[in-house]
Amino acid sequence: MLLDHIDQLHTTDMGISRIEKNLKLDTDDVVLYCKNKVLDQKCNIYKQGKNWYCEVDGVKITVNSYSYTIITAHILRNNSRKNNEAIN
């Protein structure tokens, strides 16, 4: 499981730039930011193919399951149509 290898989590220079841009982050430590998200008790962690996916607080983080490299992270889009249907 991903949590068993949390200390191996890392990313590349390009990964840092990509994650900062995608999440609009202003932090000194992108890897620590991602680790904290993955460790959040509300985080939904699942494996699909060669990657782990971690979803919490409107963010989806993609981690390679073999190297534990954080590939990317994205802000999850709310499906407002679904939300409206649930309210009605």
Image (cartoon, rainbow, N blue to C red):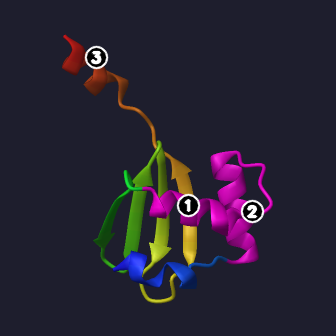
Callout 2 environment at 10 Å: few (<14), some (14 to 19), or many (20+)? few
Q: CA distance from mark 2 to mark 1?
A: 18 Å
x 63%, y 59%: residue:
33
Instruction: Answer with mark 2 or mark 3, whichever residue precedes in sequence.
Output: 2
Magenta residue check for 54: no
Tell me: residue 22, above or below residue 39.
Answer: above
Which residue does the image show at 38% across and 56% down from the upper left?
41
The first of marks 2 and 1 along the sequence is 2
Residue designated by label 2: 17
Residue at point 41%, 54% (across, down): 55
Relative to 33, does residue 68 appear above or below in the rendering? Answer: below
Disc 3: CA contacts within 10 A as few (<14), some (14-19) or many (>=20): few
Quarter location, residue 19: bottom right
Which residue matches tag 3?
Answer: 84
Amino acid type of the residue that numbered disc 2 sits on in the rendered structure: Ser
Residue 81 x/y as whole percent: 30, 22
Q: Nearer the viewer, mark 2 or mark 1?
A: 1
**Mark-to-mark CA distance, 2 and 3:** 35 Å
Label 3 SS:
helix
Magenta highlight: main SS: helix
- The boundaries of the magenta stretch are 12-40
Neighbourhood count class around disc 1 (C-alpha, 10 Å): few under 14, some 14–19, many 20 upward: few
Q: Quadrant of residue 82?
A: top left
Foreground tag (3 vs 1): 1
Tell whether position 17 is magenta: yes
Compared across the picture, whether 76 is left or right of 34 comes to left
Amino acid at the residue labelled 3: Asn
**Which circle marks residue 36 in the picture?**
1
